[in-house]
Amino acid sequence: MKYLVTGAAGFVGSAVVERLTAAGHDIVGVDNINDYYDVNLKHARLKRIEHDNFRLIILDIADRDAVKQLFEDEHFDRVIHLAAQAGVRYSIENPHAYADSNLVGHLNILEGCRQTNVKHLVYASSSSVYGLNAKTPFATTDSVDHPVSLYAATKKSNELMAHSYSHLYDIPTTGLRFFTVYGSWGRPDMAPFIFTKKILDGDTIDINNNGDMWRDFTHIDDIVEGVVRIADVIPTKNKEWTVETGSPATSSAPYSVYNIGHGSPINLMGFVKAIEDELGIVAKKIFREMQPGDVYQTYADVNDLFEATGYKPRVSVKEGVAEFVQWYREFYNK
């Protein structure tokens, strides 16, 4: 089939492209290769995924005319929409960047799907939509009406926008709420990368909420497995569904939302210890209060995703940290 993968130079996007090209699909990737973090890493990812079945187009999804032309020219079967302005803390400092990419850009992708009858749109949501929820594990049947960052609010908006298009135009859409993805070729603004770099450089690492935090760390290999499998599970209408009795993750429209995570959160200090053990270095630590936009715990209930796809995460934190540290040391010659 012919896929569009947005955010193709990104952490998850490049890994998804690699998997889809290996399976024989034709892939068009788009990315604006912005400088939110080191563009050299993005170019290195693109170099790694060069393939006869893959073409990259430099494009900003917030550019309405460019996205419209892209869909008209290419006629995609499926779209995996992973492009977004990422980062919880960055959204506090630069809110307008999130409106451009995560709201306008998402709308442009939805319009492209509508105009060209795309058979399935899979898009990235986020575990951050659970916001102030205290009940764990987080389930897609839970309310997600109290985000604690603008980034989270844009991701909840993406789900609502997708539902409206599924309802109005019968476009099958599936949202995936990602839980703390890590692994080789990962983002430099995320904790695993920051901790590893600072420990190797002899710098001090900041431990938020005095270490009393839990994250459902999910390795990139498991994430990609889930994304690729869910692309084959195209949502259909459910005429029996009602707002009063149905799950908010499904609908009478061809719409679905799933968590995609490991399903076994680990304490932040335990994760730091795994990195320390792999590096053979004890980190210098500064303990501080909870930071704006942070949440105490993330914990994915992935039962519905397993039922739909057979997806079951396999990479343990110990294995995942070892894989990431090995990549980091080789890539940065540390």
Image (cartoon, rainbow, N blue to C red):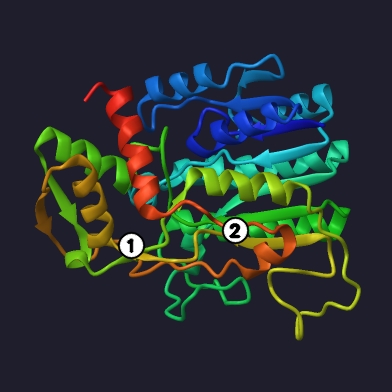
Residue of label 1: 294
Q: Quadrant of residue 51?
A: top right
Q: Residue at position x 41%, y 35% from top?
A: 184
Q: Quadrant of the N terminus?
A: top right
Residue 17 position (above or below residue 117): above
Helix, strand or loop at label 2? It is loop
Label 2 neighbour load within 10 Å: few <14, some 14-19, many 20+: some
- Decide: few, some or many residues near mark 1? Use Cα within 10 Å; few <14, some 14-19, many ≥20: some
Distance from disc 2 to disc 1, alpha carbons, whole Å, reads: 27 Å
Task: Give left or right: position of 34 versus 141.
Answer: left
As rendered, which of 114 and 78 lies closer to the eye?
Answer: 78
Q: Which residue, as the protein is rendered here, is positioned at the far top?
A: 52
Residue at screen point 75% across, 26% down: 24
User: Between 83 and 184, which is closer to the camera in this rendering?
Assistant: 184
Q: Is residue 166 visible?
A: yes
Quadrant (top left/top right/bottom left/bottom right) for the C terminus: top left
Q: Position of residue 162 (x, y in %)?
A: 72, 55
The relative height of residue 234 versus residue 304 in the rendered view (above or below) is above
Pointer 2: what residue? Answer: 312
Q: Is residue 66 visible?
A: no
Q: Disc 1 on helix, strand or loop?
A: loop
